[in-house]
Image (spheres, rainbow, N blue to C red):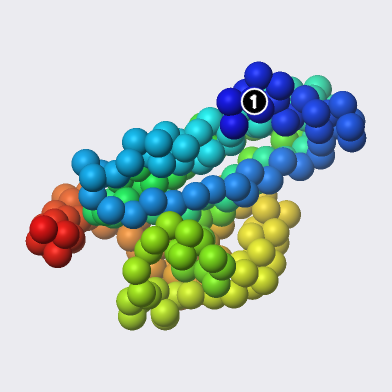
Amino acid sequence: MDRYLRVPLSERLLDDFGAVDVLVNNAGAGLQGLYEKSEWERVYGLIRLNVVALALLTRRLTPAMVARRGGGVLNINSGTGLAIMPGMAAYVGTKHFVTGFTETLRSELEGTGVVVSQALPGPVETGFDEAANIGPAGVLDRLFRISAVRCAREVVRGFERGRPMIFPGAAYGTVMTLQGALPRALQRRAARSGGRTLRNTSA
């Protein structure tokens, strides 16, 4: 990653292919466990991939889109970008960055012809959970889980329609919409309970 910060991938793309019409920031990684027990190198790598790479590519490629008055940025976020999830502090923090960054960038680029959207999927059938050492799926996870193909189709359709936030999966999308109406105090209370449970099982 540090090498790409010195000679950015975005510059190589522009040299090789010219103008980029649509940037899809899809790369991401997860990390589960109590934060104080996390290996810093993994946390730092997570931040560089989920935050720095996304911000850098967007900064490098959007000026040409604005100049052409056309293009798009699609950030693949996560439902955790709107949540409090004990055991995933670093990951959730990076996804909250993506939420705020994307919403604000969308407002800044209003009227320029550049479309900015973010997808906030729930459980999707990929190798993400295994790579992040996330445990067996719970009941809600199994209920909301969709295939990667369905997720991609719904995200692309939402992006083409210019939607600011895309929640792939009907049941999941309904729950996420309702969650947004919950008072923050209730979300914190539920998170505290989950945090205590996690700490007790990790002891």
Give the residue at x 72% y 41%: 23
Q: Is residue 153 left or right of residue 77?
A: right
User: Tag 1: residue type?
Assistant: Arg
Specify the quadrant of the image occupied by residue 25: top right
Residue 175 percent coordinates (x, y): 38, 68
Quadrant in which residue 15 is drawn:
top right
Q: Identify which residue is drawn at 45% across, 64% down.
A: 129
Q: Nearer the viewer, residue 39 or 92?
A: 39
Q: Quadrant of the N terminus?
A: top right
Residue drawn at 89 percent across, 32 percent down? 16
Residue 69 visible: no
**Residue 189 location in percent, x, y?**
14, 55
Q: Is residue 18 above or below residue 180?
A: above
Q: Can residue 10 be seen from the camera position used here?
A: yes
Q: Is residue 6 left or right of residue 170?
A: right
Residue 125 vertical placement versus 108 (above, below): below
The image quadrant where one finds the C terminus is bottom left
At 64% from the left and 25% from the top, the residue drawn is 3
Pick the residue in front: 168 or 60.
60
- Is residue 190 depicted above or below 109 in this figure? below
| Along the viewing direction, whichever of 163 and 193 lies nearer the viewer | 193
Label 1 environment density (alpha carbons within 10 Å; few <14, some 14–19, many ≥20) = few
The residue lying toward the viewer, choosing from 60 and 46, is 46
Instruction: State left or right for residue 197 relative to residue 158.
Output: left
Residue at the farthest top position: 6
Number of on-image labels: 1
Helix, strand or loop at mark 1? helix
Q: Find disc 1 in the rendering and name its residue.
A: 3
